[in-house]
Image: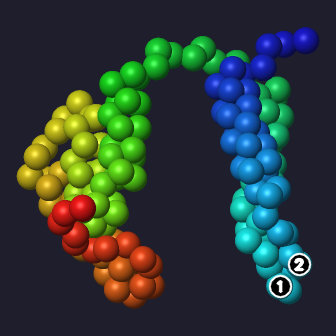
Amino acid sequence: MRRPNAKDLLVGLLFLAFGSAFLLLAQGYPLGSARRMGPAYFPQLLALLLMAIGLLAMLRALAVAPTAIGRVAAKPLLMVTFAVLLFGFTVERWGLAVASVGLVLLASAAGSELRLARAMALAVALAAFCAAVFGLALGLPFPILHFGG
């Protein structure tokens, strides 16, 4: 028997683990039905979809030629992770626009070719888009700009 493709196998296991965790977390909410969906209906549906993708990736690992796993790019991984965490901690305190700008600028610093003017233009454009769509059009309970406690 030949060895499975390690990249596809690990991606499949990752999707399967996340799907299983979300499925487990959604068990505490009522499911409802297709006609009257409860709070757990959509999360469980997405969790099952993640698990299916994970299983398909694991099956693909058996069908394709094995490839070596390269080294992990630690700096970009940590910078993007920190950018998402920063967004989560600042969105309520400073608003959606400021948190979006911080997210884009910090995530842009993870790349090897940081162009500050381009990153700033993208950050401002994304902040305006998020404020327009999520704050104004959809009316989600995020402050668009908020300074203070």
Of the numbered discs in the image, which one, if any, rests on residue 36?
1
- Position of 127 with respect to 17 (left or right) is left
Q: Position of residue 95 (x, y in %)?
A: 27, 66
Q: Residue at x 34, y 63 (%)?
A: 92
Res 42 → quadrant: bottom right
- Position of 16 with respect to 100 (left or right) is right
The amino acid pointed to by label 1 is Arg
Q: Residue at x 72, y 22 (%)?
A: 5
Res 91 → quadrant: bottom left
Of the numbered discs in the image, which one, if any, rests on residue 33?
2
Q: Tell me, yes or no, whether the two marked residues, 2 and 1, touch with CB atoms within 8 Å.
A: yes
Label 1's element?
loop
Between 116 and 138, the residue placed more toward the observer is: 138
Q: Residue furthest left?
A: 117
Classify 10 Å Cα crowding around label 1: few (below 14), some (14-19), many (20 and above): few
- Position of 15 with respect to 69 (left or right) is right
Between 117 and 103, the residue placed more toward the observer is: 103
Looking at the figure, which quarter contains the C terminus?
bottom left
Evaluate whether residue 80 shows in this view. no
The amino acid pointed to by label 2 is Ser
Measured in 3D between alpha carbons, the distance from the residue under mark 2 to the one under mark 1, in whole angstroms, is 5 Å
Residue 99 vertical position relative to residue 39 in the rendered view, above or below: above
Q: Residue furthest front?
A: 149
Between 140 and 125, the residue placed more toward the observer is: 140
Q: Position of residue 122 (x, y in %)?
A: 22, 59
Q: Position of residue 117 (x, y in %)?
A: 9, 52
Label 2's element?
loop
Q: Residue at x 33, y 46 (%)?
A: 86
Residue 33 vertical position relative to residue 53 in the rendered view, above or below: below
Q: How is the image coloured?
A: rainbow
Res 37 → quadrant: bottom right
